[in-house]
Amino acid sequence: MLASLGLGLTAGRAAQARVAVQAGQQLPGTSCPVFPANNVWNTPVTGLPVAARSAVWLAHMSAGSSFLHPDFGPGGGASPYGMPWQLTTRHPELVHIHFQYASESDRGPYPFSARTPIEGGPAAGGDRHALMVDPANCTLYELYNAHYHPGGASTAGSGAIWRLRSNKLRPAGWTSADAAGLPILPGLVNYDEVMSGHLDHAIRFTAQTTSARYLWPARHQAGATSDPNYPPMGARFRLKSSFRLSRKRCFHACQIVVQALKTYGLILADNGSNWFFQGTADPRWTYTMVDQLKAIPARAFQAVDERCLMINGDSARARQPGTRSYRDACQRR
């Protein structure tokens, strides 16, 4: 584990490093990490080079005429707008799911019930994601197109189970509850994280058209074209460090998200409207909070080349800035 931290650590610094890579970002309301701290979701990309196709990817995502759109907020219906998630009870009831894409889904069982919140509400169409966390075992369960039926008849399009203390990725070519084969919950803008002043991870977002390939850490593609000028699943985009929004136009919550976009960026995770980024469904979001984020122009982003962060293609463990491994791989190219 310490190999990625470079050489020459003292015993004290080595102990601190072990704690850092094991801890990760803590999931609000639990003692669970949101993957280890050296996971690619939790890795800063401020020092990475601009990707060779950055300009053409931006052009094919209408960046010149688009602004970021927070895909979450107060909403006008009974359910807050965004991705709901649920902490399970200490001993949740587990059920088996009948999957449409069974060959690329984890068999389970899953802590899924009639009380599990569904994206968009119980009667929703669309993706109908269901995100559940067992805090006792630090395990994340995610379903796509989830429908609960009693008597063992529940169905979903696909499902994935993630151990939050592990960097293990899905098998190459496998989907998850997301088109990119990535987890959903770790990439959401979480209200509690924002209000704590620490949003220390990349954020999930969508693009209308993607190419039929994927980049690490993605494991799956759902592209409509073989044209490499369209972005692939897993592409990462960073808000330029020079971008500024005044504090009169961008209050505390907005500034926290802006800084996260500069430090950790966006990861392309699914097909959808261009530049829509996702957050948790939470009644505490206000129209002011989300409206201020709509002032961020897409043209202020650049795609970054994060290939040098990869240590093993089957793992989300990433080289960390400030280590010898990072300097050798990312700063001597």
Image (cartoon, helix red, strand yellow):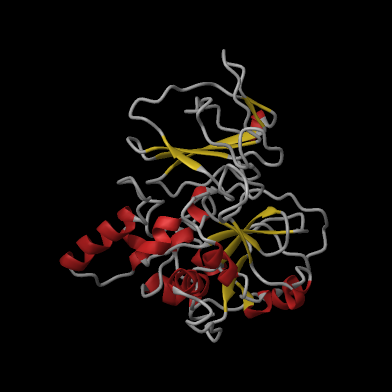
The residue positioned 63% from the left and 34% from the top of the image is 158
Q: Nearer the viewer, residue 28 or 120?
A: 120
Q: Nearer the viewer, residue 160 or 14?
A: 160
The residue positioned 61% from the left and 78% from the top of the image is 50
Occupied quadrant, residue 61: bottom right
Residue 62 shows up from this direction: yes
Count of numbered labels shown in the rendering: 0
| Above or below, 70 relative to 163 | below
Question: Percent position (x, y) of residue 3?
Answer: 34, 61
Compared across the picture, whether 174 is left or right of 190 comes to right
Compared across the picture, whether 164 is left or right of 282 comes to left
Question: Percent position (x, y) of residue 187?
Answer: 52, 55
| Above or below, 247 relative to 254 | below
The residue positioned 64% from the left and 42% from the top of the image is 175
Q: Nearer the viewer, residue 316 or 23?
A: 23
Question: Percent position (x, y) of residue 294?
Answer: 62, 70
| Above or below, 92 relative to 264 | above
Occupied quadrant, residue 216: bottom right
Residue 311 shows up from this direction: no
Q: Name, please, the residue furthest toward the top.
A: 151
Question: Percent position (x, y) of residue 94?
Answer: 46, 23
